[in-house]
Amino acid sequence: MTLDEVAPPTGTVRDWLDARATEGGTAIVFPETSTQLDWADLRAAARGFAKALTARGLGKGESVAVVAPNSAEGIIAFYGAVYGGFRATMINLAAGRDAIAYALTHSEARVAFVHDSCAALFETANPGTTEAVALQSDVTVDLCDVTAGDHALLMYTSGTTGQPKGVVHTHASLLAGGWTTAVAHGLSSSDRGFCVLPVYHINGLCVSVMGSLVSGGSLAMVGKFSASRFWDQAETGRATWFSAVPTIISHLLHGEADPSARCKAAIRFGRSASSALAVETQAAFEARFAVPVIETMGLTETAAQILSNPLPPATRKIGSPGIAYGCEVTIQDAQGAILPPGVEGEIVVRGPNILLEYLKNPDATAATFRSGWLRTGDLAKMDADGYVFVTGRLKELIIKGGENVAPREVDEALYSHPDVIEAAAFARPCSSYGERIEAAVRIREGSDLSATALIAICEDRLGAFKAPDAVYFMDELPKGPSGKIQRLKLADLIAL
């Protein structure tokens, strides 16, 4: 099968994996172990697991939990579940015991593939309803028929309040998630992505794994991100591009490791997603490493990417996650009217990569859609060229004295100091203004940067009204599985 840049992929993940196996070639290399999976070997192992699950009596569309880090076994389990017509339920290893137990129970997963390194975690979190199963070889059994509209993926979002929601994607929307990435970045069979993000998060799964399946390229995959080993691993794995998040970009920028000339020549671009990339961080990264960073935007509900900046030499607008690829994106007001360029509203999206539903939650599903558009909860403006400029989250806006303050503005000011590695502004209840602005930062080791100096920078760039009243220093800011800083947790973590 070949990549069509105009129309989304047809068929199922099973169809595409069969096609790649027939064509041959490398699917994934693992720089840490010097091993690799060819497409034919991956398909054979996945099909074997699919048949073993079928022989156990699992029905079409049932959840199969995958409890594994980035690994050959985890990828085989994912592809095997989807290949067999089951719903791969990717368990977030960083979510904590209670959230894992909830996912196993809510998904009604009767079986789970559990990687050896996750056995203790699974035993602690398992409510007793899920049985661990091993990857097995072929048994004699016929697989069920699979269609593009069948369930393929269940992934739980890490909500800030209440229980996580189970996002359901079909074979069609899962493939479309890889397609939007491949089209935006011009991926081909000669490309090899570098996967450092966990595949139990939508970015790692759809951008890297599905992107390579749809484009016919390959992946270099490591267990987890390491700033000190990143460039060496990318070179060993012969990567031509990588997908990251702003915290990774920042850690690389402030780290001591540099890519070799050979590595820099091989890497066409890096991409950043999951949260806003500070303008200063992007500029400094490109100046130091001579690797362009393509800012993008996506959601679990949209099988990752909805927006991306074009590749150089086309116009990249720094500070914007770009334009829509493979889907429609507009800015709407609270009533659903499309707003003109330059007017702030909510980002909404529709297209082939949109989720089917929230599992067992019709009210949340209905509330997320309006007249066929998925409401993202992100505030933004769109310019006349279609580039979107995110201004904040509806739930994260700081309302000080009746005025809306986007925390990203404050973040950008804090990141302007070269010693700041991580930064996040947040709201604190205040009797005078309703809410006041505070911020948390992580700075480079050995820096003597003070809160007073950072507040002065913000006052100079933003004015006294938008400057934080207090800045706190932390060893590590709280993050979700994608590496996105969890801004709404900071006020509770930093008790007065």
Image: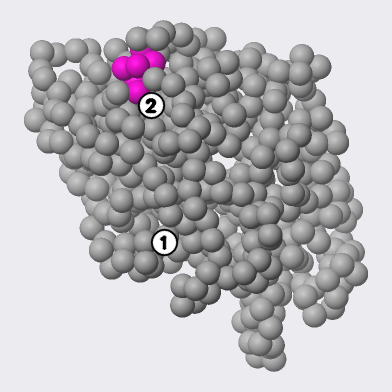
The answer to if 54 sits in the magenta stretch is no
Asked if residue 394 lies left or right of residue 65, the reply is right
In-front residue for pair 300/104:
300
Report the quarter where the N terminus lies: top left
Residue 334 percent location from the top left of the image: 49, 76
Residue 74, disc: 2
Q: Residue at x 83, y 71 (%)?
A: 462
Asked if residue 153 lies left or right of residue 440, the reply is left
The residue tagged 1 is 373
Report the quarter where the C terminus lies: bottom right
Q: Residue at x 85, y 33 (%)?
A: 288
Residue 470 percent location from the top left of the image: 76, 72
Residue 401 percent location from the top left of the image: 69, 88
Q: Which residues are magenta?
A: 16-21
- The number of discs equals 2
Question: What separation in Å lies between label 1 and label 2 (alpha carbons)?
Answer: 33 Å
Q: Above or below — where is 273 with respect to 83?
A: below
Judged from the image, the secondary structure of the residue bearing numbered disc 1 is strand
**Type of amino acid under label 2:** Gly
In-front residue for pair 174/232:
174
